[in-house]
Amino acid sequence: MSSPLFNGDFIDETLRTLALLFPRYDKDTVSWYKKLSPLFSLDNRAIQCGHLRAEDRHIENFAYWHDRLVVLKQVFDEAEPNNLSQWWYNRRNGVQWYTFWVAVTVLGLTVFFGLVQCIEGALQVWRSW
């Protein structure tokens, strides 16, 4: 593909970048994009740019958009979940995910059994009078 304004390599890389950011066969991404499309007047053809193979996703394959993709990746890696729903779906660091949910489970069980123990103690005091 070529254009009198843009280099053909630039256009091809831009289409590959769109395919990287908006994978065509990811249902969640497609539904998210279609939901935002009418609100922000987005082009629906952006999610139809195809799908990249694993070897085509390497950052070295992007000359024009390289720096912006690196910044985008850094921001993505540095983002932390803010609520329980985000913690549940954030599986980027498996060890951290399992550790967090084990800690939440242990805390929940501790509170539950502590409450049961308090109620049982209160019943025993009441019964002894």
Image (cartoon, rainbow, N blue to C red):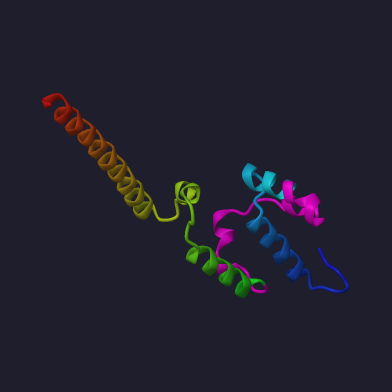
At horizontal 61% and vertical 75% (from top left) the residue drawn is: 67
Quadrant of the snapshot with the C terminus: top left
Residue 125 image point, x, y percent: 15, 31
On the image, the x and y values in percent for residue 21 come to: 64, 58
Residue at x-position 70% and y-position 66%: 13
Q: Is residue 66 left or right of residue 8?
A: left
The residue that appears at 66% across and 71% down in the rendered structure is 65
> Residue 78, position in %: x, y?
48, 66
Q: Look at the image and tell me whether residue 44 can be seen.
A: no
Is 2 displayed left or right of 98 in the figure? right
> Is 44 contained in the magenta span?
yes
Q: Is residue 81 visible?
A: yes
Extent of the magenta region: 35-64
* Magenta-colored segment: predominant secondary structure: helix
- Residue 126's quadrant in the figure? top left
Does 77 sit above or below residue 88?
Answer: below
Front position in the image: 16 or 89: 89
Q: Residue furthest right?
A: 4
Residue closest to the eye, 106 or 58: 106
Q: Is residue 42 above or below residue 8?
A: above
Quarter of the view holding residue 122: top left
The N terminus, quarter of image: bottom right
Residue beneath the point at 62% across and 44% down: 28
Q: Nearer the viewer, residue 39 or 44?
A: 39
Question: 14 above or below 35?
Answer: below
* Residue 34: x %, y % from top left: 74, 46
Q: Number of numbered discs present?
A: 0
